Amino acid sequence: MSINETTAAANGRGSDAWARPWTQLSVERVSSGHCRVTFDHPPINTITAATVAELAELVTLIEEDPELKVVVFSSANPDFFLAHYDVENDPARTAALGLGPTGLPAWTDVLVRISRLPVVSICAIRGRARGAGSEFILACDLRFASRENTLLGQFEVGIGVVPGGAPMARLARLVGRGRALEILLVADDLDGPRAERYGYVNRVIADDQLDNEVAAIASRLARFDREAIARTKAHVDRVTLPAEAELTGAITDFRELFARPAQQAQWARLQALGLNTDSDLERSLGHRVVESLPDA
């Protein structure tokens, strides 16, 4: 369906901004109040500097749209929602994006702005979301996951770095300190049912019902009053979202630790095993990350 012309006219940037040639995702306007975003960056939806830049542009469009009430994020790849950050693509490219409107580094800025949107952000998770992919879903308001086909995790400690998008601040609020430390330090995958038990996701839904159930929730929200949604969400945000000071140091820690020779060597071993490709390593990354460690 084409972008609603009334909304496009109200948004000073016009329909051309929404209809731009996205390279990392596709955007569909289901109705004036409901937008669907599909990640589509083969082979496994890794997050690169281009992904960060497009998400920043998308968030700006959402912020400026006076009619939008709900945005649903999903993936064109049923096995990978958002795999993780692609360090092979060169972290300097993401660093070169500079600071976003919040004054935070580009990736952190995107996550903070998504959380603060006056519209409801929903992730319909099918497949794997690890590392920065996990950080993205944690920044969204609601997370519904395929019962049979979801793997979530923060594998960064397993490769000797700190998660750069500061999921520490979000996970601890969602699942509690002990479970947050388990997820972050053990660095293994959680399947859908376990993620639901921990509070990582709102709930799991049978895979063949996930799309329809999320669409029904989004359609319901799209009928509600936008100002009531925005103000209610703002009240919840004030008492649940981490302060910016809790988010600022993680990306620096990530870059400093990743620059060490040992981590460069470990990353090279992962690449040799199939990192950033649709490989058995990527499908079982939480379990297999230990294979990149040097012999004890």
Image (cartoon, rainbow, N blue to C red):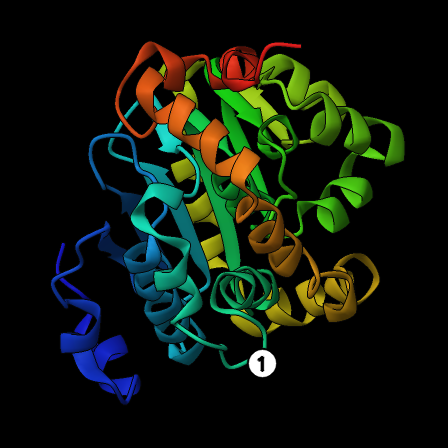
| Secondary element type, mark 1 | loop
Residue closest to the eye, 53 or 160: 160
Q: How many other residues sit within 10 Å of disc 1, few (<14), some (14-19) or many (≥20)?
A: few
Residue closest to the eye, 134 or 238: 134
Say if residue 255 shows up in the picture.
yes
Say if residue 199 shows up in the picture.
no
The residue labelled by disc 1 is: 103
The location of residue 31, given as percent across then percent down, is: 28, 58
Quadrant the N terminus occupies: bottom left
The location of residue 215, given as percent across then percent down, is: 39, 38
Q: Residue at x 40, y 47 (%)?
A: 72
Q: Residue at x 40, y 44 (%)?
A: 87
Quadrant the C terminus occupies: top right
- Left or right of 224? Residue 4 is left
Compared to 217, does 23 lie above or below? below
Amino acid beneath label 1: Gly
Quadrant of the rendered image containing residue 256: bottom right
Compared to 83, does 222 lie above or below? below
